[in-house]
Amino acid sequence: MDEEQFAYRDALHAFAGAAGLEVPAWVVEVYRTRDVLRAAWRELVRTGEDGEWVRGVGRAGGEEGQQQWVDMMGRLSEKSRRAQADARRMATNSFKMSIG
């Protein structure tokens, strides 16, 4: 239901005759993964890695700078997915060791 907002925005742009202003796919993806991104960012802040992750990002300005931010969020999302998979694997191994 929440993602209906993007279709609505696209419909408004079409109604207004503003062709080419469709919601970019990256906006929808960031919206879908916002909780994962937020948690991953908080972890970077906690560990002091946040500055390193954003150093120089967006400096290019314009569309290139925007793409740098999109790429950084993609890397952050992937880092979070790997960490979650590692945690699940460790929990499974720990359980297996505890039963025998």
Image (spheres, helix red, strand yellow):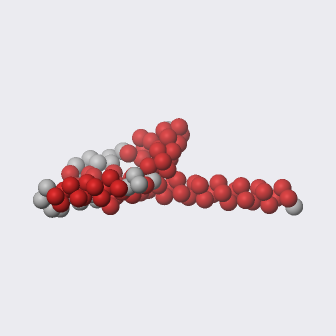
Q: Residue furthest left?
A: 17
Q: Which corner quadrant of the image does residue 9 belong to?
A: bottom left
Q: Nearer the viewer, residue 31 or 44?
A: 31
Residue 24 placed where, x, y %?
Answer: 28, 59
User: Which image quadrant: the C terminus?
Assistant: bottom right
Residue at screen point 22% across, 49% down: 61
Q: Nearer the viewer, residue 84 or 10?
A: 10
Q: Work out whether residue 28 can be spotted.
A: yes
Left or right, 67 with reference to 45: left
Left or right, 86 with reference to 81: right
Residue at screen point 48% across, 48% down: 35
User: Which image quadrant: the N terminus?
Assistant: bottom left
Residue at screen point 50% across, 40% down: 42
Residue 96 placed where, x, y %?
Answer: 80, 61
Residue at screen point 38% across, 45% down: 54
Q: Nearer the viewer, residue 50 or 40?
A: 40
Residue 30 placed where, x, y %?
Answer: 39, 53
